Image: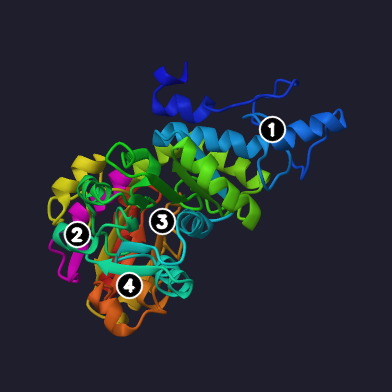
Amino acid sequence: MTDDWKTRTAMVHGGTSRSHWGEVSEAIFLTQGFVYDTAEAAQARFIQTGPDEFIYARYGNPTVSMFEKRIALLEGAEDAFATASGMAAVSGALTSLLKAGDHVVAARALFGSCLYILSDILTRFGVEVTFVDGTDLDQWEAAIRPGTKVVFFETIANPTLEVVDIEGVARLAHAQGATVVVDNVFATPVFSQAIRQGADVVVYSATKHIDGQGRALGGIILGTRDFIRGTLEPYMKHTGGSMSPFTAWIMLKGLETIDLRVRAQAATALALIEALQDHPKLVRAIYPGHPSHPQYDLTIRQMGKGGTVVTLDLGDQTKAFRFLDALSIVLISNNLGDTKSIITHPATTTHQRLPDAQRLALGITPGLVRLSLGIEDTDDLIADILQALDAA
């Protein structure tokens, strides 16, 4: 039946499993363990569990399972595993696949914590990592070699909004037998077609658009059933990065409205960037869904829309700070994908640990700000941005 459902219907009803009480809203099963009728039943459960059989909350839980099934429907994946945070999803996906001596090729433009996992943690345990310009297929082709185990990139880079050609990179990676792992946060699961376009494993920080209301940390890893249950689940359940049942319930509530929220946010982002074209206070205004973006055609082909985030460059840190401090609706914080509009100065927050030269090489200038559009009135947001630019 769910095969025929459109997105909004699936996000309200998909994956629901009701108890004998017949509750309307999904139940929260706040329990660490489960009871068995007999010792023989316990033994059988530990040997082979079915999709609706659970033994310990770190291994699986009815509420968490509902969230996993529903997000898998949205992404078009066979299966999913919910994690405690977005970074637990990134680190779990990569670490479960890799061992000492393996080779990874990754885009150089990544969120600061993703860079840390690749450049500091994985290399510490003997994994070789090569970084490339994610937008340059020639660099990917030169770096991926026989024996390369994994390629990793953000489909839209944080915070510079470079767009990576999923089909192009996947074709090169699969030719050498490598697994394609993508962080798809900026694309959102609403606009994502990453699995159809060649990604093997997709990760999200559910903290962002999936929750969408700044309430809880969470993550999700999606892929084939063989990967999720055969490779990832043993690693995650023994290392303890699983999602709590209460968080899963929050994420289920977020999925009910994600399609409505994200489409409204993307429409506002496009309206804002159109209003800011050629603004004298801006060095540049970046949005993948606007024809001025160098990967606009690729963006529309991959996603259909440009996402919910725009990046503005005011030239220097003083002007950027003056701009941020003058905003009255938009909040200064370091999250994104929220119903509230949020702005961030990456050079002094999310990417502050990077050396100056590395930040500049990535395009993260002192004047750069990342703006995640919420669901406030579009005209109000544009007016707030324009008055703050005057103050800058």
**Mark before the other along the chain sequence, 4 or 1:** 1
Residue at point 35%, 76% (across, down): 347
Q: Is residue 187 above or below residue 372?
A: above
Q: Regarding mark 2 in the picture, which secondary structure is present there?
A: loop
Of the numbered discs 2 and 1, the one sitting upstream in the chain is: 1
Query: Per the image, is 272 magenta?
Result: yes
Q: What stretch is highlighted in magenta?
A: 266-285
Residue that label 4 marks: 323
How packed mark 1 is, by other alpha carbons closer than 10 Å (few <14, some 14-19, many 20 or more), is: some
Residue 134 x/y as whole percent: 23, 61
The picture quadrant where one finds residue 356 is bottom left
Which of label 2 and label 3 is nearer to you?
A: 2
The amino acid type, in three-letter code, at marker 3 is Ser
The mark lying in front, picked from 4 and 3, is 3
**Residues under labels 4 and 1: Cα distance?**
45 Å
**Which of label 2 and label 1 is nearer to you?**
2
Which residue in the structure is indicated by mark 3?
341
| Residue at (37, 46) in percent of width and height | 188
The amino acid at mark 4 is: Phe
Q: From this viewpoint, is residue 322 visible?
A: yes
Q: Point out which mark residue 27 bears.
A: 1
Q: What element carries label 1?
A: loop
Q: Do residues under tags 2 and 3 come within 8 Å of each other at their CB atoms?
A: no
- The answer to which of marks 2 and 3 sits earlier in the sequence is 2
| Residue 374, percent from left and from top | 40, 51
Which quadrant of the view contains residue 327? bottom left
Q: Which residue is drawn at 73% across and 39% down?
A: 55
Q: How far apart are the alpha carbons under marks 2 and 1? A: 44 Å
Earlier-in-chain disc, 4 versus 3: 4
